[in-house]
Image: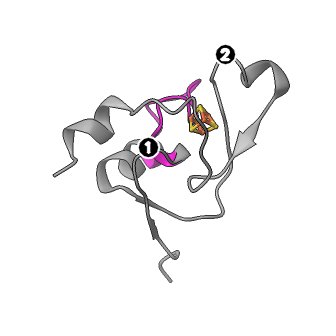
Amino acid sequence: MMEQQTLLHEGQCGLCLHFGESHPQEPQLIQIRQKHEAPEDIIEECGHPSHAPLGLKVTPISGCAGFELAPEARETIH
Ligand code: SF4
């Protein structure tokens, strides 16, 4: 069965370059960024310099003011 996918908008962690920043080439991350959708229940570390020392973990639908659009997500916004 397909996992439930949720549409992501700019400002949400799934489209942020800090989401899973230590392993940006992971196919699932690239797919999330290109399709702008993700399962809500996956958890990744946030690599933002303010959050990484705290070990912050976020879901694709989380977000914060440190959001920066990932390059792969930028290319596919229509
Ligand atoms: S918590 Fe903020 S900086 Fe970290 S991935 Fe989410 S939007 Fe990006």
Segment colored magenta: 14-28
- Three-letter amino acid code at the position of disc 1: Leu
User: Residue 2 location in percent, x, y?
Assistant: 47, 78
Q: Residue at x 69, y 46 (%)?
A: 58
Q: Residue tagged by mark 2?
A: 49
Dominant SS type (magenta):
loop
User: Looking at the image, which is closer to me, 56 or 3?
Assistant: 56
- Outermost residue toward the front? 65
Residue 30 on the magenta span: no
Q: Residue tagged by mark 1?
A: 15
Q: Residue at x 81, y 29 (%)?
A: 55
Query: Is residue 18 shown above or below 37?
Result: above
Image quadrant, ligand 1: top right
Residue 17 on the magenta span: yes
Along the polypeptide, which appears first: circle 2 or circle 1?
1
Could you tell whether 46 is left or right of 15 in the image? right
Label 1 CB sits under 8 Å from any ligand 1 atom:
no
Q: What crowding class fits label 2: few (fewer than 14 Cα within 10 Å), some (14-19), or many (20 or more)?
A: few
Q: Secondary structure at mark 2?
A: loop
Q: From mark 2 to mark 1, how far is it between C-alphas? A: 17 Å
User: Residue 68 location in percent, x, y?
Assistant: 45, 29
- Three-letter amino acid code at the position of disc 2: Pro
- Outermost residue toward the bottom? 1
User: Residue 46 location in percent, x, y?
Assistant: 66, 32
Q: Residue at x 43, y 58 (%)?
A: 8
Coloring applied to the structure: one colour
Query: Is residue 5 shown above or below 71?
Result: below
Label 2 CB sits under 8 Å from any ligand 1 atom:
no
Q: What crowding class fits label 1: few (fewer than 14 Cα within 10 Å), some (14-19), or many (20 or more)?
A: many
Q: Secondary structure at mark 1?
A: helix
User: Residue 41 location in percent, x, y?
Assistant: 66, 63
- Outermost residue toward the left? 78
